[in-house]
Each structure stands twice: as structure tokens, then as C-alpha cells.
Amino acid sequence: MAYADQVFSQILNEHLMNLHTAMPCRVTKYYPDEHKADIKPLFSRIKGGETQGYPEIKKAPCLKHIEPLEVGDEVFVVFAERALDYTGNRRHDLTDAVIVGQFL
């Protein structure tokens, strides 16, 4: 039984490490006319038992109260519970990122 517990615990931990809820990111490009930004997550993830960086997220929308961003700014990002384009069954997906705050 201890071995089964260990296997299930490992599977659960790897799944939770890849569940996207919120994380800090760095701005790599800003689109002021669209109020969107390309961002690079600062966390790493476990994929196939290996630690890897996340891919860059393209054109994440910013909330209205966010000041104009500059390349290199650190921002706080949340990931929508469901697909923001109202299609598919995505849940907490990187493509559904929203910039909600900026670190000073």
C-alpha cells in the first residue's frame, strides 16, 4: 500500500505543479494600442519528470488600471478558469492569461 500511495502522491504533485492559477511574469513586449503584453513566466514547471521553463505567453490582456508597461517590468498574472475566447474546454491554460497587477 505504501508504494501505491507514493505513486499517487507523485502523480498528484506533478499535476498540481502544472495547474496554472497565478504567477509572476516578466514583460518581453508591450502593445500600448491594444493594452496587451507578451510575457515570460518566472516559474519553472515539471514536464516528463524534468524541470523546464514555461514558454512565452503572447498578447496577454492587461486590466485597465495597469500603468503602461515597459520591457523588463514584472507583473502578476492570473489564468482564467475557462477559455477566455469561450471555445473549447481549456481550464487554467497559459493562453488564458490576464495581467492583473504590476510589481513596483
Image (spheres, rainbow, N blue to C red):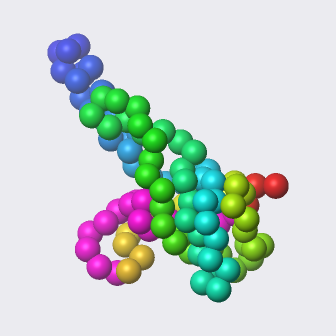
Residue that lies at the very extreme toward the right in this rendered image: 104
Count numbered badges in the picture.
0
Whether residue 13 sits left or right of residue 57 in the image: it is left
Quadrant, the N terminus: top left
Q: Quadrant of residue 3?
A: top left
Q: What is the x, y in percent for residue 78?
A: 54, 61
Residue 16, x across and y down, in percent: 38, 41
* Image-based side of 14 in relation to 53, left or right: left
- Look at 72% across and 57% down and name the residue there: 73
Q: Can you say which quadrant of the picture contains the C terminus?
A: bottom right
**Is 36 situated above or below 18?**
below
| Residue 2 shows in the view | yes
Q: As drawn, is 70 to the left or to the right of 38?
A: right
Quadrant of the rendered image containing residue 100: bottom right
Q: Is residue 100 left or right of residue 55?
A: right
- Residue 97: say if magenta: yes
Q: Nearer the viewer, residue 61 or 39?
A: 39
Above or below for 84 versus 54:
below
Confirm whether residue 98 shows in the render: no
Name, please, the residue furthest toward the top: 2
Where does the magenta region start and end?
Answer: 86-101
Q: Quadrant of residue 52?
A: top left
| Residue 65 on the magenta segment | no
* Residue at 40% over, 49% down: 19
Image point (18%, 21%), residue name: 4
Q: Nearer the viewer, residue 27 or 98?
A: 27
Residue drawn at x 48%, y 61% is: 57
Q: Residue furthest bottom?
A: 33
**Image height of 15 relative to 8, above or below:** below
Q: Position of residue 13 (x, y in %)?
A: 36, 33
